[in-house]
Amino acid sequence: MGIIIAVVFVLAMGIGAQAASEPRNLYWGCQGEDVAALQTQLNSLDFNCGKVDGIFGPKTYAAVVALQKSCGLAADGIVGPQTRNAIANLLTKSSSPLPILYQGCRGDKVAELQNKLKAAGFDCGPVDGIFGPKTHAAVVALQKACNIKVDGIVGPQTWEALSKPIPKPPAESGTPSRGNSVPKYTKVLNMVATAYCPCNKCNYPYGGQPSYIGLPLGHGIVAVDPNVIPLRTRLYIEGYGEAIAADTGGAIKGNRIDLCFPDHQSALNFGIKNVKVYILE
Ligand SMILES: [Zn+2]
């Protein structure tokens, strides 16, 4: 009898020892080093639980619940195996964050940025790990080409843009690129283009009349918001060609542009597109 109890006791000890190697569940009221470690992790993941004091109180609870919700877990405020895994995953993801770079920064990450800019076709000068004016200009050009916030600062959006195929940058002012060259220009605008033709339907109630500045309607005549593009400005429109800002339209306001086509079917075929509009010299 005594022996059996002893065996059971030893087995129980063994099981107990094994269980102890697994981290314990943490919840409101727990205290200890492990709570402090949890708090440090939560804070580093931006689930703010305030001071790292090793006491699982209301702030830690709120942080755990927020983290659980963001991971789609049961928001019970108890850090068990699932929540521990979720935290571990988040920590791995955030362990090599891409730095925010801007003019004046130096180092390996700047060199990495420069290599990526070059690979994407944005000239940033020599890869020297120094974020100078040329790198800044290349970042700005990239941001414009990718239609993201143009601030010359390399943050998450810009890093992400660099990780994807990038639309070819337009040629620098004055240097035509590719076969389909853009004439000398001073400015590029991203605009929403629609199409029209000289027919009555498209020009109601001005059917049969010339454009606003008196030029006959046809290919190369475009309607603009004169507050954005002054009338008579020469333009080059991606996918359309050279044109002159010669017309206006009731719906053509802000970044809208209306391109004239010789016939109604061509206008219908064009539909509506995002285009780059080059303001020519
Ligand atoms: Zn028409």
Image (cartoon, rainbow, N blue to C red):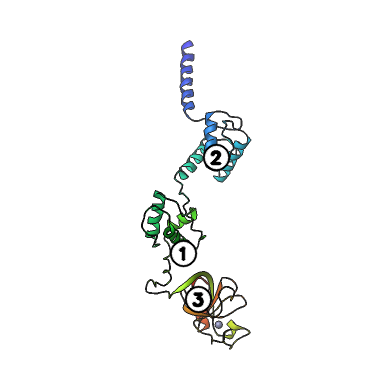
Spatial separation of the CA atoms under disc 2 and disc 1: 36 Å
Q: Residue at x 51, y 80 (%)?
A: 244
Q: Are circles 3 and 1 on residues that touch, CB within 8 Å?
A: no
What's the amino acid at mark 1? Ala
Q: Residue at x 45, y 61 (%)?
A: 137
Query: Count of labels shown?
Result: 3
Q: Secondary structure at mark 3?
A: helix
Q: Secondary structure at mark 1?
A: helix
Q: Secondary structure at mark 2?
A: helix
Of residues 27 and 129, the one drawn nearer to the viewer in this rendering: 129
Q: Nearer the viewer, mark 3 or mark 1?
A: 1
Position in image of residue 236 (x %, y %): 47, 76
- From the image, tell me which residue sits under label 2: 43
Q: Is mark 1 within 8 Å of ligand 1?
A: no
Spatial separation of the CA atoms under disc 3 and disc 2: 52 Å
- From the image, tell me which residue sits under label 1: 145
What's the amino acid at mark 3? Phe
Q: Residue 204 is drawn in which quadrant? A: bottom right
Sequence-first disc among 2 and 1: 2
Residue extending furthest toward the top = 2
Spatial separation of the CA atoms under disc 3 and disc 1: 22 Å
Crowd class of label 3 (few under 14; some 14 to 19; many from 20; radius 10 Å): some
Q: Is mark 2 within 8 Å of ligand 1?
A: no
| In the depicted structure, whether residue 123 falls above or below residue 93 | below
Crowd class of label 2 (few under 14; some 14 to 19; many from 20; radius 10 Å): some
Q: Are circles 2 and 1 on residues that touch, CB within 8 Å?
A: no
| In the depicted structure, whether residue 6 falls above or below residue 96 | above
Q: Is residue 1 visible?
A: no
Sequence-first disc among 3 and 1: 1
What's the amino acid at mark 2? Asn
Q: Which mark is residue 270?
A: 3
